[in-house]
Image (cartoon, rainbow, N blue to C red):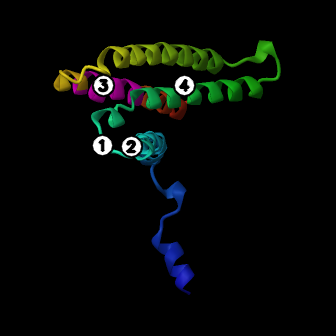
Amino acid sequence: MLMQAAQNAVPPLQAIPTDVHRYITFGIVLAFPTMIAVAGALGRKLIRGTDFRRSDFFIGPDLALGAISAGLVNLLEVAQSSASVQSLPISLFFTAAYTAVTFFLFIVILTLHQVWERRDTQPNRQILSLGIASNAIGLSLLVLFLWLKLHGDV
């Protein structure tokens, strides 16, 4: 009887409007890579065994690598799903283009880190370049992949 009441209290997944379901899925899928990147930042602090540093939270490269790996796995999945070279879907092209652009932006993030990582004398500019710009690029790449994936473009 208690189980019956619990089942009636939670609406079935198909009762949720499609747009709301899409946004819920998007939020959940975005949360996992972000949590993994933050766990990596916390891991750096734990391995070092000292107090937190600003550089622990410059996670743009970690986010970009997550986006690259998502693109590569999707590329393999799309390529495997087609039976022959003639039947390759257009999504294979979009996925390859996404992965190439993501790799290029990963190099841009690494360049930002090379320039600003050791400039502790300018903390505000370091936070702006690495804490905001680098992290925003990495997170934007993940958001773009998820958006493309949810809309069926990759």
Q: Which mark is residue 130?
A: 3
Foreground tag (4 vs 2):
2
Q: Where is mark 2, residue-wise?
A: 45
Marks 4 and 2, how far apart in space? Answer: 25 Å
Q: Is residue 45 above or below residue 80?
A: below
Q: Nearer the viewer, residue 105 or 96?
A: 105
Q: Quadrant of residue 139?
A: top left
Q: How far across and how far down the image is residue 86, in percent?
A: 78, 12
Mark closest to the chain's N terminus, 1 or 3: 1
> Which sits in the foreground, 72 or 38?
38
Between disc 4 and disc 1, whose residue precedes?
1
Task: Please name which of the two marks, 4 or 1, marks the residue nearer to the observer.
Answer: 1
Magenta residue span: 127-140
Left or right placement of residue 122 versus residue 60 in this view: left
Mark 3 vs mark 2: give the one in front: 2
Q: Residue at x 39, y 13 (%)?
A: 111
Q: Earlier in the sequence, mark 3 or mark 2?
A: 2
Element at label 3: helix
Q: Which residue is mark 4?
A: 68
Disc 3 + disc 2, Cβ < 8 Å:
no
> Residue at label 1?
52
Q: CA distance from mark 3 to mark 4?
A: 19 Å
Q: Residue at x 41, y 41 (%)?
A: 48
Q: Position of residue 3 (x, y in %)?
A: 56, 80
The reply to whether dot 1 and dot 3 touch (C-beta < 8 Å) is no
Q: Amino acid at mark 3?
A: Leu
Q: CA distance from mark 3 to mark 2?
A: 17 Å
Residue 59 shown left or right of residue 3 in the figure: left
At 82% from the left and 23% from the top, the residue drawn is 83
Q: Position of residue 107 (x, y in %)?
A: 46, 14
Alpha carbon distance from label 2 to label 1:
6 Å
